[in-house]
C-alpha cells in the first residue's frame, strides 16, 4: 500500500460578501433609530434609504429590508392607535402607559433584530403586517 497522504487544504478565508451583507443588514436594523433624531418618519426613512441603495448589491438585504420596513410601518400604525386610545381614555392610567410601553417594546425589538442580524440570524418581528412580501 502506498502511504501517500494528501495534505489538508488550507481553511477558506471568511467570505467578505457575507460579512459585508451582515454588516449592512445590522445597519439597516439600527437605522430605524433615526426616528429618535428625525421626528416623524425617521424610523421608516432610515431603513428605506438603506434598502433602496443596497437591496440589489447585498445578498439577503432585500428580504431583511422588507421585513424591517413592514415592522416599522406596522408599529407606526400601532403607535397611532395607542395614542388615540391614550387620548380618548386620558383619565385612566393604563392608556397613558400604553404608548410608553409600546415605545420600550419597539426599542427592544429593533435592538434584538440588530443583534440577531450581526450574528447572521434572521429575526421575525412580532405584530407585523406584511405590506412588502
Image (cartoon, grey):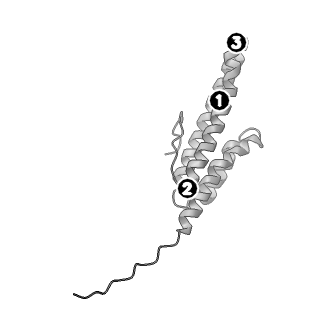
Q: Earlier in the sequence, mark 1 or mark 2?
A: 2
Residue situated furthest top in the rendering: 91
Q: Is residue 8 above or below residue 90?
A: below
Residue 102 is marked as 1
Q: Residues within 10 Å of mark 2 (few under 14, many from 20)?
A: many
Q: Earlier in the sequence, mark 1 or mark 3?
A: 3
Rendering coords of residue 23 (x, y %):
61, 58
Q: Secondary structure at mark 1?
A: helix
Residue 92 is marked as 3
Q: Residue at point 53% right, 68% down? A: 14
Task: Measure the C-alpha gap from mark 1 to mark 2.
Answer: 26 Å
Q: Quadrant of residue 17?
A: bottom right
Q: Residues within 10 Å of mark 1 (few under 14, many from 20)?
A: some
Q: Residue at point 40% right, 78% down? A: 8
Q: For this rendering, which residue is in front, 123 or 60? A: 123
Q: Residues within 10 Å of mark 3 (few under 14, many from 20)?
A: few
Drawn side of residue 77 relative to residue 42, left or right: left
Q: Are marks 2 and 3 in contact (CB under 8 Å)?
A: no
Q: Earlier in the sequence, mark 2 or mark 3?
A: 2
Rendering coords of residue 2 (x, y %):
25, 88
Rendering coords of residue 88 (x, y %):
69, 15
Q: Is residue 105 above or below residue 123?
A: above
Task: Measure the C-alpha gap from mark 2 to mark 3.
Answer: 43 Å
Residue 4 is marked as none
Q: Look at the image and tell me whether residue 95 can be seen.
A: yes
Q: Secondary structure at mark 2?
A: helix
Q: Quadrant of residue 98?
A: top right
Rendering coords of residue 86 (x, y %):
69, 19
Residue 61 is marked as 2
Q: Are marks 1 and 2 in contact (CB under 8 Å)?
A: no
Q: Is residue 46 above or below residue 84?
A: below
Amino acid at each position: 500500500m502506498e502511504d501517500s497522504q494528501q495534505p489538508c487544504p488550507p481553511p477558506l478565508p471568511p467570505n467578505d460578501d457575507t460579512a459585508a451583507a451582515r454588516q449592512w443588514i445590522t445597519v439597516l436594523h439600527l437605522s430605524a433609530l433615526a426616528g429618535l433624531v428625525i421626528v416623524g418618519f425617521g424610523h421608516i426613512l432610515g431603513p428605506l434609504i438603506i434598502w433602496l441603495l443596497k437591496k440589489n448589491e447585498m445578498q439577503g438585504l432585500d428580504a431583511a429590508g422588507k421585513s424591517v420596513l413592514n415592522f416599522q410601518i406596522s408599529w407606526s400604525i400601532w403607535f397611532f392607535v395607542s395614542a388615540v386610545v391614550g387620548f380618548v381614555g386620558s383619565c385612566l392610567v393604563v392608556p397613558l402607559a400604553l404608548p410608553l410601553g409600546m415605545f420600550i417594546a419597539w426599542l427592544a425589538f429593533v435592538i434584538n433584530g440588530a443583534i440577531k442580524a450581526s450574528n447572521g440570524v434572521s429575526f421575525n418581528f412580532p405584530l407585523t403586517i406584511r405590506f412588502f412580501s
